[in-house]
Each structure stands twice: as C-alpha cells, then as structure tokens.
Image (cartoon, grey):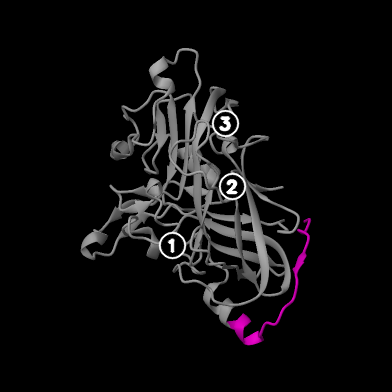
Amino acid sequence: MRRAPLFSVASIAFSAAMAAILCSSACSDDKTSVAPPGNDSGTPDTSTGSSVTLAFEARVGSEPFKCTSTYSKLGTTKATLNITDFKLFVYDVRLVGKDGTETPVSLTQDQKWQYQNVALLDFEDRTGSCRNGTTDTNTKITGTVPPGEYRGVRFRLGLPPALNHGNATLAPAPLNDEELFWTWASGYKFLRIDSRAVRDDAGAGDAGTDDAGHGDMDAGDGGMNHGGNPLTFFVHLGSAGCKGEPQVGEKVTCTYRNVPDIDLPAFDPAKNKIVLDYAALVSENDVSGGGMCMSSPTEPRCVPIFKHLGLDIATGNPAPGQTTFRVE
C-alpha cells in the first residue's frame, strides 16, 4: 500500500505537556459515531505553534468557480447553469501524523471568518449570477499546529452542536451570516450551493429571478413539491429532525446531524490545496432546474448528494466514499 508523503511544520517552542493536553482533548474520533469525540464542542484550542494555512478552491469539474462563469454538461441531464451562491462551514481541522495521530489546528481568531474552531469558506463575490452575499471572499483557513511531521488533513463540514442553534442576528462573525441560517429549523446551513439553469426555453422573467427568498420552507414536504423557480437547483446541507426551541432556553437535539468527516490522506499545506468540486457533488442529480436537496432523509434528491459528501442518509452519520473534496 502506497504511503502518503510526510511534510514537516517548522519547529517553535512547544512543551510536551501541551502536546499531551491537546491529544487528550481533541484528537482522533470514530467516524461512524453520531457524536464523535475530537474537538466537537466549538471550544478553541489556545495552544501556540507553527503557523499553517490551508488553501481551498471551489471548482466545477476542471474549471475554477466564478460567479461570472457559465458551466455546462453538469448532472445527469448535462445541464448548463450559473452558480449563484457557494459557501460552507468547516470545523475541527486536524493534521494527521505519520502514525495516524490527529493534531488539531488552532484557528486564528480573526473576528470575521474564523470563530473558536469554526471557519466559513465563502467563494461567491456578489458579481455575475451571485446575489446573496457580499463582495468579500475567504478561501483559506489559518492557524497554528505543534511542530511535527504530518501526512494529511481531516476536517468536518458543518458546525459543532454547541454553535449550531441560536440567533444568527446576535451571533459573532462568521455565524452572523443570516443567509446560512434556517429559521424554521433553528440551525445553520453547513453548505449552501445554489445554481440556476441556462435554458433556451427560459422566459425573460426567469432570467432575473432572485433566489434569496426561495422555498426553504418547503423542505418539510420532503423535497417533492417545491413550487419554486423551475430553473433553480439548491443544495443546502444541515442537521435534520431537530427538536427544541433555543429561543426559550430549550436544548436542541437533532436525529440527523449530517456532518461529514472529510479525510484527505495526502496533503501538504505548503504544496497542495483542497478542492471542492460541484460537478462531482451533483454528478448523479438532474440540476436542470426545479429541484433542491434540503437535507431531509426522505428526499430522493439528497441520496446521491449525501453519498458524494460522505454521509449515510439513513442515519446522518459519516460514511466512506466521499468524492466532493480532493487534494491537488
């Protein structure tokens, strides 16, 4: 079996005692567990160490994602479309040592893109077909790790339970992005990628439709009847089957966490970037319009999308075989 190459992070002062604390609080977890260990609390790791930057790129097949671009031959119908939003939350970032030991990356608290052990990756810049967000983008995660030799990276797509439910209007950045909050579910969209098909039969009125007020509220129908724009296709990943009203102090519990644990075994942050490929994500869906995946376990459109994200749709637990993320 071919082993992944090792890379070293430059050494700085770091005590063995701190290493022991880090490993005891935030190391490897069981990917098949509903609530795996690791740093799942949202509590930041306050260690010091060597600086590390993880670069991400949004891609549509072989093409970099741009709000001004049109993409073709996507999904089962080889649709042509524009992407109108492209964001995701990532947390619990870990570098993997040569012996498989996980070491958490302590994220830089920048008051904008990173909070505790959570980072928001935002690839849309409000140009072209993108209308929901701002002109600011973020394509990297920054932090520190203890010196050592590492051969890979792991992270979760989503938010820890402690940060997933609350009031987005009062939350600190980046959790104050209301476009990523489901008011009806009292939780966040971990990933939001919206698209609009470009079709010869599209009416002039459809071409300018703003999707910001789309049919999220229709998710309760299992995704079968949306009544939304016939040109759009939305992928919104978040926890499902949640109970509890955080506004009145109730604890929220969710039957389906829907948090993929991404494992990329051959990754050197000095040489590689992490690619998120929309074409791979929707390769088994009809994205020519009139559909969505809102993370319901009974929603047929979510079945292939969950598979490509590395999720078991029946349980909401991580599963092997994700194809959406890769290293280049």
Work out how far the residue at label 3 is from the one at label 2, CA to CA, in angstroms. Answer: 31 Å
Residue depicted at x 53% and y 41%: 125
Q: Name the chief secondary structure element in magenta.
A: loop
Instruction: Give me the C-alpha separation between circle 1 and circle 3.
Output: 33 Å
The residue tagged 1 is 160
Viewport quadrant of the N terminus:
bottom right
SS class, disc 2: loop
Q: Residue 186 vs residue 272: left or right?
A: left
Looking at the image, is 146 positioned above or below residue 156?
below
Tally the marks: 3
Q: Which residue is mark 2?
A: 321
Task: Please state which of the two labelled residues, at mark 3 or mark 2, is closer to the viewer.
Answer: 3
Residue that label 3 marks: 68
Q: Amino acid at mark 3?
A: Thr
The kind of residue on which mark 1 rests is Pro
The mark lying in front, picked from 1 and 3, is 3
Mark 1 or mark 2: name the one nearer the start of the chain.
Answer: 1
Span colored in magenta: 1-20
Precedes in sequence: disc 3 or disc 2: 3
Q: Earlier in the sequence, mark 1 or mark 3?
A: 3
Under tag 1, what secondary structure? loop
Disc 1 packing (10 Å; few <14; some 14–19; many ≥20): many
